[in-house]
Every structure is written in C-alpha cells, then in structure tokens.
Amino acid sequence: MTTTEAVPDVRTSMPLTHATLPRWAPILVGGLSLAAGGLLAVLFGWGIVATVVLAGLVYIIALPCWSFVVENRRAATERAMTTLVWAAFVTALVPLVWLVFLVVTKGVQAISVDFLTHDSHNPLAADVGIAHALVGTLLVTLITAIISVPIGVMTAIFLVEYGKRSRLARWITFLVDVMTGIPSIVAGLFALSLFVLILGPAIRFGFGGAVALSLLMIPIVVRSTEEMLRLVPDDLREASYALGVPKWRTITKVVLPTSLGGIITGVTLAVARVIGETAPLLVICGFTNTMNHNPFSGRMMTLPVYIFYSFTQPGVVPFNAPPGTQPPGIAHAWGASLVLILLVLLLNLVARVIGKIYAVPTK
C-alpha cells in the first residue's frame, strides 16, 4: 500500500492594490516646478516665457518619476501620457488666446459707428471706415458660395453614389486632394490670367476674386460633403430601392435630407475658411477707397486687403503726437481684423446651430 504526501500550497496571491500618490501630489510638483523655474530665471536673467517653459519641463519629468518610485511603471506611464496631453493642449491654446486678446484689446479702440459706416481708407481723412471693405467681403464671399456649393455637393454625390471604385472617381479624388494643397496666391494668379486672356490686362473686379476663392473652397466642400454622405446607412438606400424609388429620387429625398446638417456645417466652415484669404483678392480684386456694389465692374475692396494696406500704408504720425504714437492706419487695421474675426466667429456659430437643428436624432 502506497501513500502520497500532500504537497503544500506555496502559491502567493498578487496584491490587488498598490501604493498611490496623494491627491495633492500634482499641485506640489507644480509648485516646486514653478519655484525651480523662477530660481533659474532669476539666476540667468530669463523672461517669464522661459520660466514657464522650464517649469513645464520639470513638471513633465518630475511627476512621472515620483509616480514610478512610489506607485509602479504602469501608473507612471499613465501620468506621463496625461501630462503630455495637457501640455500639448496648453501649447495649442496659448497662441489662440494671445491672438484673440491682442485683436480684441487693440481693435475695440478703433470700432465706432463712423468706422463701420464710412468707406475711405486714407488714414489722414476724417471719415476713415471699412463699409466698402465689409460690403465687398460679403459680396465676394456670397458669389464664392454660389459657385462652390453646387459644384462641391454634386461632385461628392458622384463620388459616393455613382462613381464607387471607378477610375474616374479615383482621379477626381486625387485632383481634389491636390487642389486642397494649392497655395492661395496660385489660385489668384490663375483667376487673373484667365480673365486677362478674356477681358484684357487691366481687368480687376470682385467676380474674379470669387472665382479664385472658389478654387480654394470647392475641395473643402467636396471632402466634407463626401464624408457626410458616407455616414448615411446603406439600409436607408436599400429600403428606398426596394419600394421602387429611382436612384436620383433616393438621393434627393433620403440621402441628402439625412446628411443635410453635416453638409451645411461643412459648407459654412468652408466659407469661414476662405473669407480671410488675402493673396487672391489682392491680385484680382485690387484696391479702392470707394464703395462698389457691382462685383462685375470695377475694383472692389475686401477686409483682408484693407488690413494689408492699412499695415503697409499706415500714414504718418502727427507732428504734435506724443512719443511712441503709432500711425493711424495701424489702429484701423486692428479694427478691421476684429470685425473679420467676428464674422468668422458668427459663421462658426451659425454652422453649429444649423448642425444641431438638422441633426438626425439618435435613440
């Protein structure tokens, strides 16, 4: 008779918890990092920007190292990635906030009723205003949208609904991608050369600027509309086909209404993208101090061109002005910049509102 001895269980259970840093650890590390950056700044005479950058680097290194010693490698990696993400966010946010702060603080000083209603660019005149540039910007942008939206939407419909996996669709997609990266000055030179060949070398008018901006806006409309159409479920199309509805009617009655919110949002953002272009308008629209309501005749001023000329031709400082006074054109340029930013902000708000109104409800 044989007997077997029981083998003792020597397995050890792994702990489910580990030591963690206190909640105030990031605050402590941040304070010490600022102190270290400030100390080095005082010793070497650095400015506030260098101090903040150095403190950020110390924080990014110190907190994960402390976590690695106290906690474990996984927690340290988590803290390091979180810190890098926040650092990237702050790095991207600082220039934006700085830009908006400068434009608002400097531009609000030039905003007035006369500035918005008069139409002269001469910095030495008493009735300097941006009314002619504001009207020109709105007219050129409106014509640009009238040209670009039908072409862009119909192109996207062909790529998604009719030309799937065809050679022509691949070529169109490739050309749209190429047009997306075209420099704006090239679009302006193309429009100028086109109308010079047709109407003569002295031609400068607002419609030419709209054509140039259309070359920049169409690819954006195509891409945004294409993505929205691809989000429409194929089940909706197949259900419509099963009821005997033809393809074109399925597109107009099912596909487009379903994606209308996203399409309008993409179009509005595309308009906001091209409304601030300067080079094409500088080339083909020209410069004028007077109001022009006819985009098909005569030079037409726009806000980006107005800002450009206000900085390059700011006028002269009055002889009795205190030291450090800037030429009057600089203040006008800041005011026009603020108006342009407000237009872009308004377009983005409109895009968000329209997107929410026409958004497809989800269960």
Image (tube, rainbow, N blue to C red):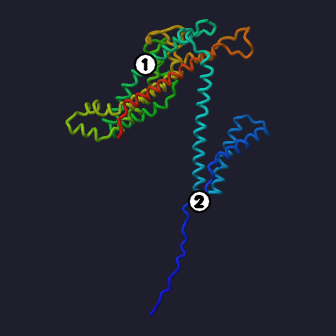
Label 2 crowd (10 A; few <14 / some 14-19 / many >=20): few
- On the image, which quarter does residue 234 sit in? top left
Image quadrant occupied by the N terminus: bottom left
Name the outermost residue toward the bottom: 1
Q: What residue sits right under mark 2 in the picture?
A: 18
User: Which of 228/61 is in front?
Assistant: 61
| Residue pictured at 50% horizontal, 83% vertical | 6
- On the image, which quarter does residue 249 sit in? top left
**Amino acid marked by disc 2:** His
**Contact between labelled residues 1 and 2, with CB atoms less than 8 Å apart:** no
Name the outermost residue toward the top: 126
Determine the CA span between mark 2 and mark 1: 62 Å
Residue 73 drawn at (x, y percent): 60, 57
Vertical order, 47 against 274 (above or below): below
Vertical order, 40 against 78 (above or below): above
Name the outermost residue toward the right: 43
User: Which of 141/296 is in front?
Assistant: 141
| Residue pictured at 57% horizontal, 39% vertical | 89
Q: How many marks?
A: 2
**Amino acid marked by disc 1:** Leu
User: Which of the two discs, 2 and 1, sits closer to the camera?
Assistant: 2
| Residue pictured at 58% horizontal, 42% vertical | 86
Q: Is residue 168 visible?
A: no
User: Which of 252/36 is in front?
Assistant: 36
Vertical order, 175 against 309 (above or below): below
Is tag 2's residue or tag 1's residue first in the polypeptide sequence? 2
**Residue 66, numbered label:** none
Residue 343 drawn at (x, y percent): 50, 21
Q: What residue sits right under mark 1 in the picture?
A: 142
Name the outermost residue toward the left: 244
